Image (cartoon, helix red, strand yellow):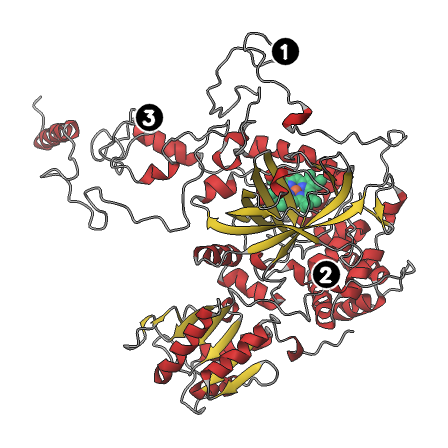
Amino acid sequence: KKPGKLVKAAVEKAVDKVTEMVNPPIPGVPNSEPPSLDEPTEPRAPLPPKPDQTGPETVSPTGAPTGAPKLSMGQQGEFLTTSAGARLYDTDHSLKAGERGPTLLQDHHLREKIMHFDHERIPERVVHARGYGAHGTFVGYGTASNVCKAAFLGDGVETQVFVRFSTVLGSRGSADTVRDTRGFATKFYTQEGNFDLVGNNIPVFFIQDGIKFPDVIHAGKPHPDREIPQAQSAHDTFWDFVSTHTEATHHVMWNMSDRGIPRSYRTMEGFGVHTFRLVNAEGGTTLAKFHWKPKLGVHSLVWEEAQMINGIDPDFHRRDLADAIESGAHPQWELGVQLFPDTPRQTFEGIDLLDSTKFVPEELAPVQPIGLLTLNRNTMNFFAETEQVAFHLGNLVPGIDVTDDPLFQSRLFSYLDTQLTRLAGPNFNQIPINRPHAPVNDMFRDGYHQHAVHAGVAPYKPNTLDGGNPFEASAADRPFVEVAQPLPKAAKVRQSPASFSDHYTQPRLFWLSLSPVEKEHLVRAFTFELGKCYEQAIKERQLRVLANVDPTLCAEVAKGLGLPAPAPAVQPKKVAPSPALSQVGKTWPTDGRMIGIVVDPADLDGVRTVRETILAAGMVPLLIAPTGGPIGDSGLVAQRTFLTARSVEFDALLLAGSPPPGPDAAPARDAKAGAPGGLVDPRVVLMVQECFRHAKAIGAWGAGQAALEASGVAGAGIAVGDDATKVLGEVAALLGAHRVWERFPATIS
Ligand code: HDE
């Protein structure tokens, strides 16, 4: 039977197709597919990397420079290849049996491409999953040399560092400005090996013994049934745990204070939390607590602002850090130590130095500066650096040793162990970001992702076949030697010392050290969080805990919850407040502060002068206009429009005028039409009102005053006048105090 016409046509088409498949169209070759309009068809130089982006160190696992091309070259070579180096002619079509036919198993490029993609994600950190890192340098002052022999603390010694900031509870994609503790982890690539200082922005912790860490984290993470809520502590399981586990009270007080919502990583303190044991050249030991002090001072958001930012810019903190570094405003922290004599009791002024729920007020032991950290380079690849960095408390250098703090001891296990799952094997110190800059000569071999090609036959000791190498260091070679700390005469017990059971004195100290406005914020935070709990019993139990801290605190929170305030069950101890704990009442540098300027097309000279003055003062001006692009022929360019600007981005707002509403303005129902100077865009009104509510400085000159009037704001922290420079001067002075604290007089004292 002859084939029908249709079948014949199909066969002919298939043959054509086969011919085409054997000679596939090659981009750039005549008669092949038309090239894409957007992508260059010929190789050409890529955009230059940003100035602060250089490739990761290309050193071998032994720390020696390899001279290997930096991985950053990946996207700059001429031809696309497979991972085995074969050049590819097409990465857009899978290999099929005909245009509409099934995909062939033979398509090894398709399989490799999808296989690699399928495995791009690695497990996020079980805690501190959301984080952001940057490179920098640390320069020792030499002031610690009498107590610590660590070489990197020597006078003028410069050490490269990598710092990762993080939140604790949220997943990798969660928002930055949630109420939470922040991680502040630093890897010092010292000449004596890596030293990791893995701290937080709060000097105390929830628990005293690491065995409880899974409990506190299970309680804080989203509820296991619905996986709600993400990245927050305002829910029943968290308050169920902390209300029944009163040693968490101190940490919770800090969390509920403004410290739980930092303005920026740059304005955040850091604490090593535990007590460390320092060793000097003579072998003398001193107990010490590490502190990071930000040069820009300690500043926080206000709660409404933090909540708004979570929606408006969930990357607020990482953007702030990256922008500052890229613009050359390199954030700095001084490293400081509080020093305590290493006595057998390991206490200071009655404070147990092995209890991580206690801190030592600076008034009792001053923080002595020992070096300066500067973050000056953004990462080039988030995954390679920030995601793959692995901190470990056991990364210690000669001169810095551990103590018997039971929290510290558990952490020494956890940080190695967790990487086995997260980084899939024991060779994670060979990943570029983790590689020491000191020579490495270990006898660890093989394992997943082994990158080193070890020579020799004798990875064991003693050996003669490899000439006895490597050798154990003698004292003169500066090895890391554990302090031969005498052990207490004791039995093996699952118990804590009696001093660990005072859970209220220091929370009370913290409360009494805050200014009235900070106390009010703390009360509101407790009220908010407990108000989000469903279980009445949990609220009542937490009120009983707060009563033991301070009756006023308890009464204020109880009022907000509509519950009776219980009487304290514990007689409060007498404590001396620590003024150093308050963020209010100090003046700080204004470098890097963001100032929004609503432009006035009729007074562009004023805008230009103010912008230049702000820049000269090291602050960041952002021009806000109804639409984007150049502003008239002034040479000025709008950086924000009424659509993209929101008050939370600014530390202060200047109103040069109020241009007519932009093309996309909502009907100006809420704005007061007819204000002098014409109609005010409702979004400018909103910006002013939000800045006012968030206690930010506001300035207006000329026609800008119309927007103030339309917004109905008045009182402290508002500078007005006809002279733009004078108004800016007043606003800048207000910024030194961070917020206009007196705008809303606090009612709690
Ligand atoms: Fe951590 N912690 N932690 N922690 N922690 C981790 O290690 C752990 C604790 C801190 O940016 C994990 O690599 C236990 C105190 C920071 O990569 C894990 C205990 C402090 C970071 C772990 C604590 C911290 C971590 C998860 C109780 C402040 C982020 C991923 C004994 C001094 C580091 C990882 C980064 C990360 C365990 C308590 C700070 C699971 C068991 C106290 C800043 O190993």
Q: Is mark 1 within 8 Å of ligand 1?
A: no
Residue at position x 9%, y 32% in the image = 9
Displayed quadrant of residue 639: bottom left
The spot of residue 728 in percent (x, y) is 50, 79
Placement of 235 over or under 344, stated as above or below: below
Name the disc covering residue 462, or none.
Answer: 1
- Residue flagged by tag 2: what amino acid is it? Leu
Which of the four quarters of the rendered structure image does ligand 1 lie in? Answer: top right
Question: Can you tell which of label 1 and label 3 is closer to the viewer?
Answer: 1
User: Gap between marks 1 and 3, in whole Å?
Assistant: 40 Å
User: Gap between marks 3 and 2, in whole Å?
Assistant: 57 Å
Question: Which mark sits nearer the N-terminus, 1 or 2?
Answer: 1
Question: Which mark sits nearer the N-terminus, 1 or 3?
Answer: 3
Displayed quadrant of residue 308: bottom right
- Residue flagged by tag 3: what amino acid is it? Ala
Name the disc covering residue 84, or none.
Answer: 3
Residue at position x 75%, y 34% in the image = 283
